[in-house]
Amino acid sequence: MTDQIPPRRTAPQAAARRVVLAWAFLVLTLLGNTAWPLSGQTQERPGITAVSLGAAAQRRGRVYGAAVSQQALEDRDFRRLLLQQVGSVTPENGLKWEVVQPQRGHFDFRQGDALLGLARRHGLEMRGHTLVWEQQEPAWLQTVASSDLRPILKAHIERVVGHYRGQLRSWDVINEPLADDGSGLRRHRWWRALGPEYIDLALEWAHQADPGARLLINDYGLEAQTPAAAVKRRALLALLRDLRRRNVPLHGLGIQAHLQAGQNNGRYDELVGFLKQVQALGLEIQITELDVDDRQLPGDPALRDRLVAAEYDNFLAAVLSNPAVRQVTTWGLSDRYTWLNSQSPRPDGGRQRALPFDEALRAKPAVAVMRERFARAASAAVSRRDRVATEQSAQEESDGIEGANAMLLEQWVLR
Ligand code: XIL
């Protein structure tokens, strides 16, 4: 016989193979929920201390997320870490005016769509950021007559919010509206053209374009125990009260939380008091851009990591005591991609270590601290609408994990 027919697998062989695959699948499913080592460099032993930040938050009805730049999105290893760790993503720049409407009337949603595609494939939420801001505006906007700005803003909001209708849970509609000196609203282009009413209008237009989306005002400089922060908190509270009283469609407040390591000596009780007042207005609270600037810390990386972790610890202990704080988003996830290296360079020329994971994507002490704070957080006040959405996304997420595990299975086991 020259033509040998390969022997068919016998029944016991096939059964044994099924058992091996079932075990492999089970193990990978469990690992799918843990911080699996990246390039073998992790400091954590998978399955022991390791549970993802997203999972830890979810157990208390909270959502942990990260901002993602286009560059980070294209980094395969980073993307893998992201998918392990987060329940939500925010496009770091991808939905800002200069990206979305680079020429008047020409819209470009490629960056936002790419991130949303990833989010949907893996059962993650995506946040919208941002619709009215004085920065990162396209050059053409500078040349527009003030009297033309109202229809331009309306068209922009309708187009951008409409494009993502039903797909983003929340939008940072108004970004950084308050003047730093506490004098009230920042007097930027939109304020000058439309008056203080620009806030009402933008919220109304966004609400009409996507009635299901939670609409937020998002601002910075609110966290410190300083007179400047106190004035800003007061001005913000007055604004929020006024909008609520007049039934303008505003559903939440975003606290950016770009922290300085060592600020406040770790105290955040004034912020805690402020959050209670915001909660009393019936608003949801999100921490939207958390990171810890280490430029004032000494160079030693281990010391810096400890102090940065301590800042995350103190801050999260404070804000997670409030059940209205539904979501915590860090402005990035790994030190490989942080805006702080250009925004706030260290005087010694070193790189910032502001985020939970280091440049090699290894967990830093902040990760364990954050997990612990999520685990100890008061359970969030979950609305009925969110409960339904969470059940759906949990189903999608488990589909996503199975999908991811099936891919790993293909690569590692079935080779
Ligand atoms: C920053 C981005 O991280 C940078 O990449 C960009 O060059 C400038 O903007 N407050 C905000 C964010 O609301 O949109 C900013 O993001 C950081 C401060």
Image: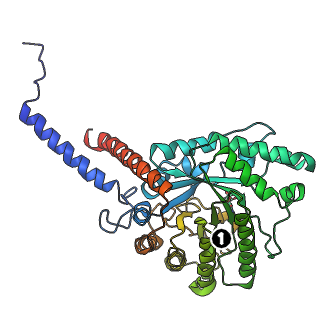
| Closest to the observer, 9 or 195 | 195
Depicted 405 relative to depicted 246: above or below: above
Q: Quadrant of the N terminus?
A: top left
- Please state which amino acid type lies under the numbered disc 1: Gly
> Horizontal and vertical percent for residue 51?
36, 63
In the figure, is residue 286 to the left or right of 176? left
Depicted 118 relative to depicted 214: above or below: above
Res. 158 visible in picture: yes
Q: Residues within 10 Å of mark 1 (few under 14, many from 20)?
A: few
Ligand 1: give its quadrant: bottom right
> Horizontal and vertical percent for residue 167?
56, 45
| Closest to the observer, 62 or 241 | 241
Please name the residue shown 61% across and 81% down the image: 273
Ligand 1 within 8 Å, label 1 CB: no
Asked where in the image residue 236 lies, by quadrant, the reply is bottom right
Res. 294 visible in picture: no
Q: Quadrant of the C terminus?
A: top left
> Horizontal and vertical percent for residue 317?
50, 78
Please name the residue shown 17% across and 44% down the image: 20
| Closest to the observer, 23 or 300 | 23
The colour mode here is rainbow
Asked where in the image residue 156 lies, by quadrant, the reply is top right
Mark 1, residue position:
349
> Horizontal and vertical percent for residue 246?
74, 62
Please name the residue shown 58% across and 78% down the image: 299
In the figure, is residue 163 to the left or right of 152? left
